[in-house]
Image (cartoon, helix red, strand yellow):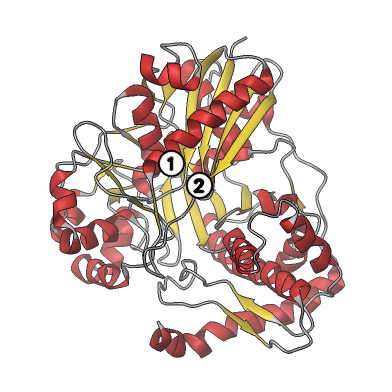
């Protein structure tokens, strides 16, 4: 049986995942980092061509590693919210402004004032937030109107890579839903919200199901990738629903805690009996990759990015053992990092603060603290933030029978037990790694008819490890620290805003 190729376009790197549907195993994975450009402290941009060139190299390395290039279908997973504007020839008119960008605090406030918080959330499933598509477009309309005039299509990050493969520009439901300008229940662009803002509509792409066929691999792209011409290319989804497909979160009763560059809590949400969308202004409710299903998303912006920040700050960017060193040193530090707390608000914060001007902080720092204390405090601070998001998400989406721990950080034998002890719930790992990339491959398999349905794909691949159980004494200790963590933002908020 021919292979499925999942392209996972992450914030920090892209990965090409070759998946064999006959054995339900990953045959090869190749990844490559690319930079995040920060022309100003609160800005975050990327060069779309970096995504494509890195994808080309990764696909070639993956097929060389597997010794096979017989790909039946290609699917995608991508980081959410980013604004990529292309002209009629498919060339980017400016660098992509990605989700980590925090320049739009004023635009967020204007959007909420224009539409009304309750009305906006009822239609779009969320309030706008810095880094979302809608406030970024509003900023561009004021500061770079020529970029909007030159734009032929608005694309989300993964859609740019798919455009290079097929020549067709479109968005899938899950990425469109995360724009802050999409009618989530109505499954269409929220024109009544968009008209209030004055944001142009001529470049809005058509929106298709995640498993819809986007097109076929055209000759130039096939030659670049080293794949056959005409391979089926499927739309794909945002990264969170993609990993949810792999992890079996395609129906209520399961939640996931994912710690990658950002941190996300995901809880599947079925349609309400009365047809209304259940929302909470501190959360996001978006369309799933699975048809006729929503999901609740709680987001921490700087999860793994916080540890990456420390790595780069300490001059360890090119040290391949940097994270292993961090884990070893953090393991030697007792819970609580000897009185050190970390607020992971390096790029503002979403759930539950929804505050682009929130700022990161180490609280309790002394001359006795070393690198291991800083690392452990970061791991614990991210876990505290994820616990906040999980508690609020479950209050909207209902209790979960199991919690799945996903993302690179949950592979850590230090960070995963910290997360378990902080949230106080058993945490299971999926046995398949590269969940977002495998999810992209599975979505491609559903679209190409390799699997009859998402349920069929889940039955073939979803397996969990034995749960990591929380330690009662450490959980009780962390409960006290968690209460301190939660109290710090309200105490420091005004100072954070003045400093920003």
> Could you say where residue 144 lies in the image, as x and y percent from the top left?
18, 58
Inspect this view and state whether residue 221 appears.
Answer: yes
Look at 48% across and 45% down and name the residue there: 270
> Could you say where residue 61 lies in the image, as x and y percent from the top left?
61, 26
Q: Nearer the viewer, residue 430 or 200?
A: 200
Q: Earlier in the sequence, mark 2 or mark 1?
A: 2
Pointer 1 local density, CA inside 10 Å: few below 14, some 14–19, many at least 20: some
Look at 39% across and 30% down and name the residue there: 162
Pointer 2 local density, CA inside 10 Å: few below 14, some 14–19, many at least 20: some
Image quadrant occupied by the C terminus: bottom left
Image quadrant occupied by the N terminus: top right
Rendered image: mark on residue 26:
none
> Could you say where residue 125 lies in the image, as x and y percent from the top left?
36, 55
> Could you say where residue 431 lies in the image, as x and y percent from the top left?
75, 37
Inspect this view and state whether residue 289 appears.
Answer: no
Rendered image: mark on residue 34:
2
Image position of 93 (left or right of 29): left
Look at 15% across and 44% down and name the residue there: 150
Q: Nearer the viewer, residue 200 or 245?
A: 200
Image position of 116 (left or right of 497): left
Look at 30% across and 33% down and name the residue there: 170
Q: Name the residue beneath numbered marker 1.
A: 50
Q: Nearer the viewer, residue 403 or 235?
A: 235
Q: CA distance from mark 2 to mark 1?
A: 7 Å
Secondary element under disc 1, as helix, strand or loop, is helix
Q: Are marks 2 and 1 in contact (CB under 8 Å)?
A: yes
Image position of 442 (left or right of 136): right
Q: Is residue 327 placed above or below 7 in the rendered structure?
A: below
Secondary element under disc 2, as helix, strand or loop, is loop
């Amino acid at each position: 049986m021919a292979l499925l190729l999942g392209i996972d376009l992450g914030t920090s790197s892209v990965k090409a995942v070759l998946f064999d549907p006959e054995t339900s195993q990953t045959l090869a994975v190749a990844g490559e980092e690319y930079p995040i450009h920060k022309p100003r402290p609160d800005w975050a941009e990327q060069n779309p061509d970096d995504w494509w060139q890195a994808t080309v190299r990764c696909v070639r390395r993956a097929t060389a590693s597997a010794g096979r290039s017989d790909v039946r279908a290609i699917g995608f997973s991508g980081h959410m919210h980013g604004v990529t504007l292309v002209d009629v020839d498919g060339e980017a008119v400016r660098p992509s402004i990605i989700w980590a960008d925090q320049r739009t605090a004023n635009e967020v406030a204007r959007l909420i004032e224009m539409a009304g918080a309750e009305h906006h959330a009822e239609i779009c499933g969320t309030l706008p937030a810095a880094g979302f598509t809608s406030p970024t477009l509003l900023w561009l309309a004021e500061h770079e109107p020529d970029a909007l005039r030159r734009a032929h299509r608005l694309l989300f990050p993964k859609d740019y890579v798919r455009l290079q493969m097929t020549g067709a520009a479109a968005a899938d439901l899950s990425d469109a839903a995360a724009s802050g300008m999409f009618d989530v229940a109505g499954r269409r662009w929220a024109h009544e919200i968009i008209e209030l803002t004055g944001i142009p509509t001529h470049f809005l792409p058509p929106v298709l199901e995640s498993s819809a066929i986007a097109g076929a691999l055209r000759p130039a792209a096939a030659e670049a990738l080293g794949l056959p011409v005409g391979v089926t290319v499927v739309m794909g989804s945002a990264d969170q629903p993609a990993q949810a497909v792999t992890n079996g979160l395609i129906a209520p009763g399961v939640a996931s805690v994912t710690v990658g560059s950002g941190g996300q809590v995901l809880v599947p949400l079925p349609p309400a009996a009365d047809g209304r969308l259940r929302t909470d202004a501190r959360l996001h409710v978006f369309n799933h990759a699975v048809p006729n299903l929503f999901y609740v998303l709680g987001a921490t912006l700087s999860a793994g990015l916080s540890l990456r920040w420390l790595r780069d700050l300490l001059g360890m960017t090119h040290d391949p053992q940097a994270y292993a060193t961090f884990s070893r040193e953090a393991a030697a530090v007792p819970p609580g990092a000897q009185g050190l707390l970390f607020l992971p608000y390096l790029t503002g914060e979403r759930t539950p603060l929804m505050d682009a001007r929130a700022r990161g902080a180490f609280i309790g720092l002394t001359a006795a603290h070393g690198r291991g204390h800083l690392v452990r405090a970061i791991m614990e601070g991210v876990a505290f933030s994820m616990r906040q998001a999980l508690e609020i998400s479950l209050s909207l989406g209902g209790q979960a029978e199991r919690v799945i721990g996903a993302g690179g950080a949950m592979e850590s034998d230090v960070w995963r037990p910290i997360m378990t002890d902080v949230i106080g719930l058993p945490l299971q790992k999926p046995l398949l790694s590269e969940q977002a990339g495998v999810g992209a491959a599975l979505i491609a398999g559903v679209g190409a008819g390799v699997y009859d349905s998402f349920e069929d794909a889940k039955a073939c691949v979803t397996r969990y490890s034995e749960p990591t159980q929380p330690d009662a004494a450490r959980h009780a200790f962390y409960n006290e620290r968690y209460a301190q963590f939660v109290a710090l933002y309200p105490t420091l908020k005004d100072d954070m805003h003045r400093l920003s």
